Image (cartoon, coloured by chain):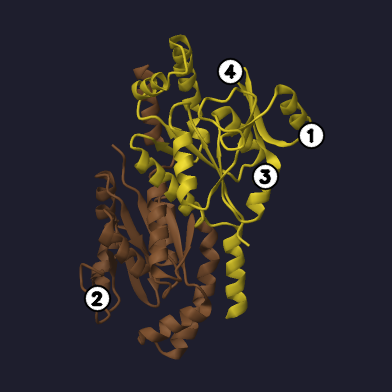
Chain colours: A yellow, B brown
């Protein structure tokens, strides 16, 4: 059976990766991997849907049990991807989408190089500043620190397979959807099995 | 400016690559490269649209002038791709689709490795036999020879980037269209230019 693909969607904070993933999950069979974090939930976030919100102690226990595909510390908080859930879905032939920051994505790349790595870019730094400011959850100092961080993050882009500029949301979603579809036509082991079938058939 | 991409659509005779390319050209901006051949036109084929039909002498003159991106001899006839037209379109930022046999595709891969190589597969050998027979232009001996040839051709599949099984035509076209879209999101030199812009902007 054709195995599921792991799509890692990542990019700077404010590029809109969360919204893109949400849209994609709404109208395709692709399933969203829910991350584990020790950071505080934002007002609109729900435990088990946006993240599994856990204490630092619970997180460290999961690390010790080797239960994470990747984890990283960002701005003093832990973020991680529960390993078992992802692997189980892939084995069932389901596609999984993982929305994570760049540090996490690079760790997933080491643990699971067969993943498809998609970088979401804001259309410009000016637009990114506007988006982060509009969110209202950060002080100006924090925003400036984050924009500096963004430039460093963007330099990782050549470690990715694809890059989607999120100017118009619907266009960006359409592009990621095309990437998912195209990746299912990649020449891979499953296609080489098909060839064997042809040889037996003639 | 973003340069056009060259998509090389290839596969065994009867897999339906011609129909797929035609559909794609009808409803996208992608332009079909017209090949040059010394074989006789089939009843429905038009000079300059399906192929440039030329004499063996004219073909050899074009070879001598280094005017072909690739050429090959198949079943005693020459087939080739006029080089200048393809390169000009790519430089204008247009995508070009090239429908050619496997031997030709392998030569293009050497001449232009940045091309995107798509292999069209028939759903089964039984279906392929049905399609070739239905065409009515071949004797049974010729069909058997061609099916044997097909198996040899299919072994080149691992030199390709993508493989699309042409069972349902509309689904196959949809897949090739997704590949074209996805390839425009590939991390490439043009995206690395965008990053430079961000650095200047901050």
| N-term mark: 1 or 3 | 1
Task: Estimate how packed mark 1 is, as few (under 14), some (14 to 19) or many (20 or more) residues with alpha carbons within 10 Å.
Answer: few
Identify the disc placed on residue A185.
none
Mark 1 and mark 3: Cα distance apart in space? 15 Å
**Does the residue at mark 2 contact the one at mark 3 (Cβ under 8 Å)?**
no
Kindly give the residue lying farthest to the left in the view shown: B47
Task: Estimate how packed mark 3 is, as few (under 14), some (14 to 19) or many (20 or more) residues with alpha carbons within 10 Å.
Answer: some
**Does the residue at mark 4 contact the one at mark 1 (Cβ under 8 Å)?**
no
Looking at the image, residue B175 sits to the left or right of residue B34; the answer is: right
Mark 2 and mark 3: Cα distance apart in space? 55 Å
Mark 3 and mark 4: Cα distance apart in space? 26 Å
Chain ID, mark 1: A
The residue singled out by tag 1 in the image is A65
The residue singled out by tag 4 in the image is A75
Chain ID, mark 2: B
Mark 4 and mark 1: Cα distance apart in space? 24 Å
Identify the disc placed on residue A85.
3
Q: Is residue B188 visible?
A: no
Q: Is residue A152 above or below residue A23?
A: above
The residue singled out by tag 2 in the image is B45
| N-term mark: 3 or 4 | 4
- What residue is rendered at 49% in x and 18% in y? A149
Measuring from the top left, give residue A1's x and y in whole percent.
63, 62
């Amino acid at each position: 059976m054709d195995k599921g693909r792991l799509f890692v969607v990542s990019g700077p904070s404010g590029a809109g990766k969360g919204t893109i993933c949400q849209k994609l999950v709404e109208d395709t069979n692709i399933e969203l991997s829910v991350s584990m974090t020790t950071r505080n939930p934002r007002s609109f976030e729900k435990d088990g849907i946006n993240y599994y919100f856990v204490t630092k102690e619970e997180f460290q226990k999961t690390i010790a049990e080797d239960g994470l595909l990747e984890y990283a510390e960002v701005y003093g908080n832990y973020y991680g991807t529960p390993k078992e859930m992802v692997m189980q879905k892939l084995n069932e032939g389901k596609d999984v989408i993982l929305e994570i920051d760049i540090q996490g994505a690079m760790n997933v790349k080491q643990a699971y190089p067969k993943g498809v790595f998609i970088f979401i870019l804001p259309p410009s730094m000016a637009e990114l500043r506007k988006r982060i400011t509009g969110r209202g959850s950060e002080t100006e100092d924090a925003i400036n620190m984050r924009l500096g961080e963004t430039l460093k993050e963007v330099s990782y882009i050549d470690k990715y397979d694809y890059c989607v500029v999120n100017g118009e949301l619907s266009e960006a979603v359409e592009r990621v959807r095309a990437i998912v579809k195209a990746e299912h036509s990649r020449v891979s082991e499953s296609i080489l099995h098909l060839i064997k079938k042809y040889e037996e058939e003639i």
